[in-house]
Each structure stands twice: as C-alpha cells, then as structure tokens.
Amino acid sequence: MNDHRKDTHGLTRRDFIKVGTAGATGLALAGMGTLSLNAAGATDQLPRRRYGRTGLEISALVGASDWNADVIPLAVKAGVNYWHKAHRWTAETMPAAIKSQPRESYYLEVVVDRVGGDHMRDTLTRNSIINL
C-alpha cells in the first residue's frame, strides 16, 4: 500500500482521509451555532455513551488535540468530554475552554507510541516506556 500515490483527483490516500475527517468534524459541529436553550436554560448536549466496562459516560463525538483552536470551545459547549491524544498538550498549551471545566468533567487520553517497532513488530516493554 503506497500512501504517496496520487489518485485521479490529485490527493493521496492519506490526504483524502485527513480531508474526510476534517469535513466530518466540521459537519458534526456546524449545527452547534444554532443550539437552542430549553426551558431550564441549558443548551442541548451531544449524547453520552458508556465507555466499555469503565462506566465512564463520554460524548458520542470524541475530541482531538489537533483540532483547530476555534473549534474546541464549540465542542466543549456541545458537551465533548473525551479528548484523544491529549499528551500533545502541556499545562500551558491545553485549550482554555477545556481547562476551565471542572477536572472531573472531562477525560484526557494519553497515547504511548511503540518504541522501535510498528503494529507488526512491537518492542514495547516496561523498560522502554520508563526510558522514553
């Protein structure tokens, strides 16, 4: 499989996936500007789902640390409470919209990349993680 090969529209497969993901995120959040207030004064929220056996209730839409900074406050307002690859943020670079929420109200996923391997040849060991 060659991710660098151009298809008939000038996009690589990887570019197509990135554009598709960004487009899907944009479509999912496009209606956020029109959220209405109900009688109690709360905005509509994304539905929540139980995360496996953990019992955690996470939003149906998962946020990503590489989203545009303008989208993140809208996502928080809509109820996104699970953030993928949050290890890319530091205490200084974490978006204020997330940081201003009570700490118990959101979940940060940290991803540990494999060391010296890939999905076929994993060399991830306890010592390799400690020595990162």
Image: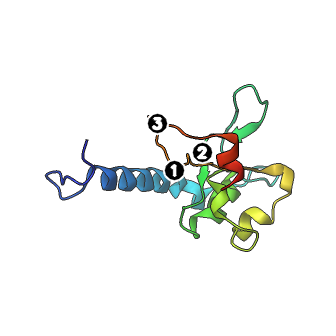
Measured as percent of width and height from the top left, residue 53 is found at: 74, 25
Q: In this rendered view, identify the residue nearer to me: 106 or 121.
A: 121
Indicate which disc residue 61 carries.
Answer: 2
- Does residue 79 appear in the picture of this structure? yes
Amino acid type at mark 1? Ala
Q: Quadrant of residue 64?
A: bottom right
- Per the model, the C-alpha gap separating discs 3 and 2 is 31 Å
Q: In this rendered view, identify the residue nearer to me: 91 or 64.
A: 91
The residue carrying mark 3 is 121
The residue carrying mark 1 is 28
Measured as percent of width and height from the top left, residue 121 is found at: 46, 36
Measured as percent of width and height from the top left, residue 105 is found at: 81, 50
The vertical placement of 46 against 100, above or below, is: above
Check if mark 1's residue and mark 2's residue have beta carbons within 8 Å.
Answer: yes
Q: In this rendered view, identify the residue nearer to me: 129 or 5.
A: 129
Between disc 1 and disc 2, the foreground one is 2
Identified at 55% across, 48% down, the residue is: 115
Mark 1 or mark 2: whose residue is earlier in sequence: 1
In the image: residue 107, left or right of residue 27:
right
In the image: residue 69, left or right of residue 14:
right
Between disc 1 and disc 3, the foreground one is 3
Amino acid type at mark 3? Arg
Identified at 51% across, 50% down, the residue is: 28
